[in-house]
């Protein structure tokens, strides 16, 4: 996937655990773990907003675009 999730870096900078973030934003530890490992296929803006509020960060600190990575199959299909 061309989007790289940097949630682990943001958590480390703030010395916050995934469990603490889960409690702060009301998202299950399992769902945050899927996001943190880069296995998530989507994220709701409301979830991104809640994470950014809890970590006091901007979305750009959590997401990085890597143009060298091939696009997902759904990204190449015409709708």
Image (cartoon, rainbow, N blue to C red):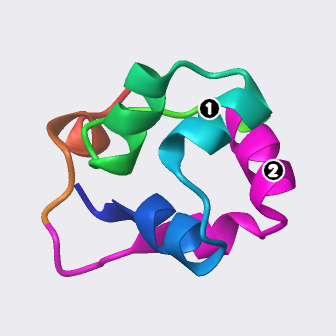
Q: Is residue 52 magenta?
A: yes
The secondary structure type at the circle numbered 1 is: helix
In this rendering, position of residue 15 left or right of residue 45 = left
Q: Position of residue 50 (x, y in %)?
A: 80, 39
Residue position marked by numbered label 2 in the rendering? 54
Residue at the (51%, 73%) spot, across then down: 12
In the rendered image, the vertical position of residue 22 relative to residue 70, given as above or below: above
Q: Is residue 17 magenta?
A: no
Residue position marked by numbered label 1 in the rendering? 22
Residue at the (53%, 18%) spot, across then down: 28
Residue at the (41%, 73%) spot, across then down: 65
Q: Position of residue 73 (x, y in %)?
A: 15, 38
Q: Which residues are magenta?
A: 47-69
The one of 49 and 72 positioned closer to us in this rendering:
49
Quarter of the image where one finds residue 67: bottom left
Pointer 2 local density, CA inside 10 Å: few below 14, some 14–19, many at least 20:
some
Q: Position of residue 46 (x, y in %)?
A: 78, 31
The one of 17 and 32 positioned closer to us in this rendering:
17
Q: Position of residue 36 (x, y in %)?
A: 38, 48
């Amino acid at each position: 996937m061309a989007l790289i999730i940097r949630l682990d870096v943001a958590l480390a900078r703030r010395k916050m655990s995934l469990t603490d973030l889960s409690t702060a934003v009301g998202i299950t530890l399992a769902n945050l773990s899927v996001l943190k490992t880069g296995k998530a296929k989507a994220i709701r803006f409301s979830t991104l907003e809640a994470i950014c509020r809890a970590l006091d960060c901007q979305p750009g600190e959590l997401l990085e675009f890597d143009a060298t990575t091939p696009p997902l199959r759904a990204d190449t299909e015409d709708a």
